[in-house]
Amino acid sequence: MFREVTKNKNREKTIWHIPLTKFKDDKSNSLGNILNKKDINEYKVDNKPLEQQDTKQFTIKDIYDIIVKTNELTHKETNTSIQKEIFKKNVRIVEMEPSSFCNRKCSFCANSFIDRTSQNIEMPEDIFIKLLEELKDINYSNTFSLNRYNEPLANREFILKRIKMVKDYIPNAKIGLFTNGDYLNKTYVRDLESAGLSYMHISFYLKDNEKFDKENIIHKRMCEVFNKINIRKYYQDISTDTEYILKAKHKKMLIIYRALNFEEAAFDKGGTIKEFRTLERSEPCFQLFNQFYIDYNGNVMICAHVRSDVLEHTPYSIGNIKDNSIFEIFTGEKASEFRRVLALRGNEKMPPCKTCQVYKYSLFEDLYTVFSKKFL
Ligand code: SF4
């Protein structure tokens, strides 16, 4: 199948879009030779077929896989079954906003100037079901997250119903959400777990003028919240100058309580938070290669930090799930074009990405990010 997908595409263009700065001259020819072979297993390194290479290190096979993947993801695909295959093979996170309301107006979030408090607009149930049916069609089993810029736990009955629906349609998916924790109590945690939530990420926020004091402020207050929701056992997962994480379990549900030091880790959220606009982005971004972000109005955005209710972000929508299937959108011309730009180092053309520092603080590592750390 890879061969089929690959042969119809422009090999030279593909290689150009792979961020192989260190390999540009000496390796790109051999990469081209690999693509020209009828069977990848004809290619041997140290007389060993590729499938016997050490997979802990990046081998020529890994690079080949990156080429094939990049080829698929940077060219529009029109065949429906190949579109589904590409989505299933690549997407590890579907993040969607079931409704618009958030109860906070944090200074580091665009909700500080976009009104998300005065009304609550829910994604229509038929559109939500359309999304779930499409995911069911490919037996989607990676992460499904019920949050973007909303506070998902603000409406208890609504979110429990939505979690149960996700569980019914795609029972093998890891269902999660990010919350500010304001609405949590003991019975709510129990109900979330019973509905099928696999993980809950609670974000810790310092009050105005408080410092990132792990011992006297953060740990103490996290323990108070754990106490309130009847979590007795937890462990410290990360403790650095930038990040502090406690983890706990409630039956099958993982609880991650995370504090980020915004003096170190804040960035401008796609250019919207002016006071954080400082550093130029210097690394490629691969969010659009394996993640899929849907706003409450159905718009699919290029990444977690770009949103359709911010005027200057509206050009960065790659489609709307009301109008097209998620597979058409993921493999469409707009998504492919953005990926070609994002895989390159730095980016003069796209304002939301110019000063983005998200690659430094991402919770998720993938083949591309590991690869780029090693080879760029
Ligand atoms: S560089 Fe930042 S703003 Fe641009 S697509 Fe990636 S995560 Fe989004």
Image (tube, rainbow, N blue to C red):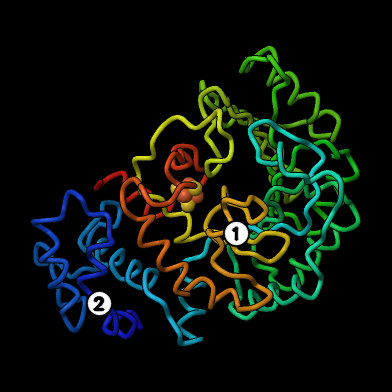
Q: Image check: 115 left or right of 79?
A: right
Q: Looking at this view, name the residue that lies furthest to the top.
A: 216
Left or right side of 332 for 260: right
Which residue is tagged 1? 293
Judging by the rendered image, the residue that carries numbered circle 2 is: 10
| Residue 320 numbered mark, or none | none
Left or right: 133 as drawn, with respect to 15: right
**Observer-nearest residue: 270 or 212?**
270
Q: In this view of the protein, which residue sits in the foreground, 332 or 70?
A: 332
Q: Earlier in the sequence, mark 2 or mark 1?
A: 2
Quarter-wise, where is residue 195 in the image?
A: bottom right
Residue 142 x/y as whole percent: 58, 63
Disc 2 and disc 1: Cα gap in Å?
28 Å
Q: Which residue corresponds to the image point at 68% horizontal and 42% vertical from the top-left?
A: 201
Q: Is mark 2 within 8 Å of ligand 1?
A: no
Q: Residues within 10 Å of mark 1 (few under 14, many from 20)?
A: many
Q: Is residue 333 above or below residue 347?
A: below
Q: Nearer the viewer, residue 279 or 71?
A: 279
x 75%, y 21%: residue: 221
The amino acid marked with disc number 2 is Asn
Secondary element at tag 1:
strand
Residue at (55, 22) in percent of width and height: 263
The residue located at (25%, 61%) in the rendering is 63
Rendered image quadrant of residue 48 = bottom left
**Dot 2, how many residues are within 10 Å of its Cα: few (below 14), some (14-19), or many (20+)?**
few
Q: Is residue 92 above or below residue 113?
A: below
Amino acid type for the residue under numbered disc 1:
Tyr
Task: Report the residue that reaches farthest toward the front.
Answer: 311
Q: Residue 237: horizontal and vertical position, in percent?
A: 57, 32
State the image quarter where residue 110 is shown. Answer: top right
Question: Quarter of the image containing the N terminus?
Answer: bottom left
Q: 188 above or below 129?
A: above
